[in-house]
Image (tube, rainbow, N blue to C red):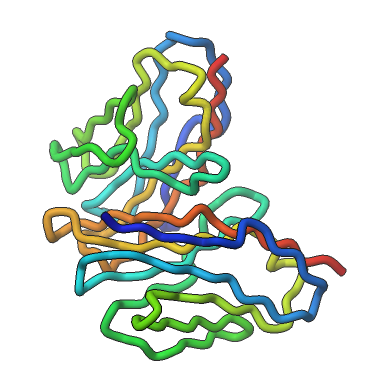
Amino acid sequence: AQKVTQAQTEISVVEKEDVTLDCVYETRDTTYYLFWYKQPPSGELVFLIRRNSFDEQNEISGRYSWNFQKSTSSFNFTITASQVVDSAVYFCALSESQTGTASKLTFGTGTRLQVTL
Amino acid sequence: EAQVTQNPRYLITVTGKKLTVTCSQNMNHEYMSWYRQDPGLGLRQIYYSMNVEVTDKGDVPEGYKVSRKEKRNFPLILESPSPNQTSLYFCASSRTGSYNEQFFGPGTRLTVL
């Protein structure tokens, strides 16, 4: 069975600090996909990034970067120079194939990030 | 605008009173799913549907029913709600394939007294 662990329940930082959100996953599949979603205080879920199991290249998008390491089964998310608007709950998720054609997302328990002035 | 809509957004009800939460998407997605979000547990899948008339159980299906009579709609039915079904519910849709990101509705906050 697949599993996603986000050990950090809550993180508080001061604006402009860098912060890394950890994600560790377990799966027996050789092909899988990892996602990060953001849930701001308004409650909706916003897709941030997808990474497939064959692509270990790190990715950077503005202040956001992701580090995928298959050797440690981790897919960590770093926010550089955090801002108050980054305050949200962040979920890491793992996708397996249900009957080979559909996707089931297994979510971690989320990390609440609080950025203060 | 491409979106997933849910109604109602907020609902307070009493134990045993049947209710339906509607979900509709306008992206012609084949795959739709329901999740519930509870503190400390993240999101857990209730039911999913791979296409019209094709539905299956997720991780926590007890106490719920779904139907998929049309491609765009995927209602969640609680025939006899209980307090342990108090939760935040999300509907999601995507194209088929594990690599496709799911688009989520705005959520329905349900309280069962």
Looking at this view, name the residue that lies furthest to the bottom. A57
Left of A101 or right of it: where is B83?
right
Figure check: A73 above or below A59: above
Q: Position of residue B28 (x, y in %)?
A: 26, 54
Q: Position of residue B40 (x, y in %)?
A: 55, 45
Which one is nearer the viewer's eye here, B109 or A65? A65
Left of A14 or right of it: where is B8?
left
| Figure label count | 0
Left of A77 or right of it: where is A10?
right
Image point 13% across, 60% down: which residue?
A100
Q: Position of residue A84 (x, y in %)?
A: 77, 67
Figure check: B42 above or below A6: above
Image point 62% across, 56% down: which residue?
A9
Image point 45% across, 89% down: which residue?
A58
Figure check: A41 above or below A61: above
Image point 77% across, 70% down: which residue?
A13
- State the image quarter where residue A4 is shown: bottom left
- State the image quarter where residue B52 is shown: top left
Which one is nearer the viewer's eye here, A91 or B13? A91
Query: Which image quarter holds the C terminus of chain B?
Result: top right
- State the image quarter where residue B72 is shown: top left
Query: Which image quarter holds the N terminus of chain B?
Result: bottom left
Q: Position of residue A88 (x, y in %)?
A: 65, 59
Looking at this view, name the residue that lies furthest to the front. A72
Left of A61 or right of it: where is B64?
left
